Amino acid sequence: ADTFSEPAFSDDDFAIDEAAIAKEALKAEIADGMTAKTRPDKAVVGEILLALEAQNPTRSPATSPLLNGKWKVMFASGASPGLKALTLLLRSAQRAPKSPSGAELSEVGDAFLTIKPEQPRAEASVRTRLLSFENTAKLNSQLEAESAVRLRETYASAESEYGGLKLPFSNGAQYKRSLLVSYLDDELLVVRDAFGRPDVLMRVDSPAAPTPSGAAEADGADAADDEAPGAS
């Protein structure tokens, strides 16, 4: 009888290779970030994202602790918290006149999104310069999971480092929207708004490891489930 050997590569191996290739292609396309002189090709980025999102390794990204940390905005269409304001700042800086010497009168630095476990979870920040005055603007938002892949964002307050200003949003003027976390791993985050427009962020810190107390709580919850009526 003929014998057949196992294939050298499994479907999982091909999936991992495809995800790795798409991820490296995306990183190369957006390597210069938001402050680049030349913007990435949206069609190319969109095509790469379709391949990458199909291999999302995180089953429930909206509730995953991997969300927590500091992220740098690499590509934005306005979906991530506070990025619509950032886009307006970038456009204003590009249109601003130059000094007689040719130096830029205004400058917008890199944008960052910090997500914490406690509310308000999200802080979007960007550093700007106008003439010799530098300032860091921040937008704080509450993030709540509506499903395994969907977040609800509610703006909480805006801050300005220059002058120490903090402007809370009143209940009547709260701005809310839903966001879809379409890809998440330990170094890359992709978020889409209700219209499907993507933002891509890269982690700039190390993902937090599970705490011993958190592991103990999880073990306690498992034990409670085992002792619950009807548990087998």
Image (tube, rainbow, N blue to C red):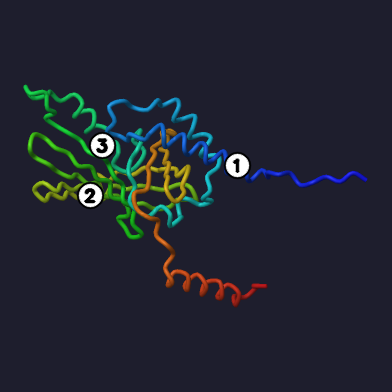
* Dot 1 alpha-carbon crowd within 10 angstroms: few under 14, some 14 to 19, many 20 or more: some
Question: Amino acid type of disc 3?
Answer: Leu
Question: Amino acid type of disc 1?
Answer: Ala
* Dot 3 alpha-carbon crowd within 10 angstroms: few under 14, some 14 to 19, many 20 or more: many
Kindly give the residue lying farthest to the bottom in the view shown: 227
Which mark is nearer the camera, 1 or 2? 1
Query: Earlier along the polypeptide chain: callout 2 or callout 3?
Result: 3
The kind of secondary structure element at disc 3 is: helix
Residue 213: mark in rendering: none
- Please state which of residues 47 and 117 is positioned toward the viewer in this rendering: 47
Give the residue at x 41% y 41%.
191
* Dot 2 alpha-carbon crowd within 10 angstroms: few under 14, some 14 to 19, many 20 or more: some
Would you say 64 lies left or right of 118 here? right
Establish if 66 lies above or below 136.
below
Query: Residue 218, how many percent across, how many down?
Result: 50, 70
- Please state which of residues 177 and 187 is positioned toward the viewer in this rendering: 187
Q: CA distance from mark 2 to mark 3?
A: 15 Å
Residue topped by disc 1: 15
Establish if 58 lies above or below 228.
above
The kind of secondary structure element at disc 1 is: helix
- Please state which of residues 181 and 225 is positioned toward the viewer in this rendering: 181
Give the residue at x 31% y 51%.
114
Residue 157: mark in rendering: 2
Residue topped by disc 3: 86
Give the residue at x 42% y 68%.
211
- Please state which of residues 229 and 33 is positioned toward the viewer in this rendering: 33
Query: Residue 152, how many percent across, how many down?
Result: 39, 48
Query: Residue 131, how many percent across, how many down?
Result: 8, 34
